[in-house]
Image (cartoon, rainbow, N blue to C red):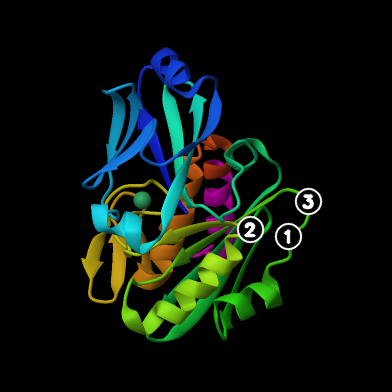
Amino acid sequence: MFTYSLKCDAAKAREALGGDYAVVELGGAVKVVESFVALYGGDVPICMYKSWRLTYTDVEAYGLAKAEALVRGDRVIVRLVRGDEKVGLPEMVDGSPLVVHAMDVNEGGVMYRVFRMGGYVELAAKGVANGVKEAFHPKKGVNILIVDLPHMPKFQHLLSEVFELAREHYVELHTTMISDVCPLCGGRMEKRGRLVYCPQCKIQLNRDVNAVWALARNIVRRLGRERQLAELREIFRLYYPNV
Ligand SMILES: [Zn+2]
């Protein structure tokens, strides 16, 4: 549900997890302390990550109960999940092909987008589950659904749909729009009203559209799938040949 990439001593991390990969109860080797996600070896934190979209209360609000942790190079990829949620971080990191589905939920409704090699699709959906039924066809490979959903009472019913979907699919929930990160270079973009502009890449996009591209880039990067970052850039250039 929430994925983090922590830089740390791999040997210590393996020792804490008892191997390269483990699913642990949250509060054991993986703890959330205030807005920090940390991997502990006994009482000692090995590495931690400052989360800009997780606070201590969120752990209870979202029913987060477990953590998946996978050691890769000098990083530990950590995914916080609910007790009933589908786990499978190794597949998310190594499985192929990877298709990233993204849903942007706001006052205007639900916008659904699919990022896959050779194509990019945008369509409006009636709800989270309806959108998935219409367009989310888990085929061979890894399908990750990113949902950008404000944590507000009026969207509570949609949040319930997201929780239900997470029992069957890999779902990543986001609750804050990151609209100032460039989908091509990852640099900061300048705000221009409803638009954002990257001085480095000379591209300008609607900030909501940009936020979803940035979310897709973010999850691919957190999973350590460097090759897919290049693919995302290719998809972007195919879809926006004139920016
Ligand atoms: Zn850029």
Give the secondary structure at mark 2: loop
The disc at residue 169 is 2
Residue lying at the far right in this picture: please name it.
Answer: 140
User: Which kind of residue does numbered mark 3 sit on?
Assistant: Lys
Residue lying at the far top in this picture: please name it.
Answer: 11
Decide if ligand 1 comes within 8 Å of the CB at mark 1. Answer: no
Residues tagged 2 and 1 counted as in contact (Cβ below 8 A): yes
The disc at residue 138 is 1
Residue at x 46% of width, y 35% of height? 77
Gap between marks 2 and 1 measured at Cα: 8 Å
Name the residue beneath numbered marker 3: 140
As drawn, 108 above or below 121: below
Residue at x 30% of width, y 66% of height? 196
User: Which kind of residue does numbered mark 2 sit on?
Assistant: His
Magenta segment: 230-243
User: Which kind of residue does numbered mark 1 sit on?
Assistant: Pro
Q: Position of residue 64 (x, y in %)?
A: 42, 53
Residue at x 47% of width, y 24% of height? 17
Main SS of residues in magenta? helix
Depth-wise, is mark 3 or mark 2 nearer the camera?
2
Q: In this view, does 136 lie to the left or right of 53?
A: right
Report if residue 243 is visible in the image: no
234 magenta-colored: yes
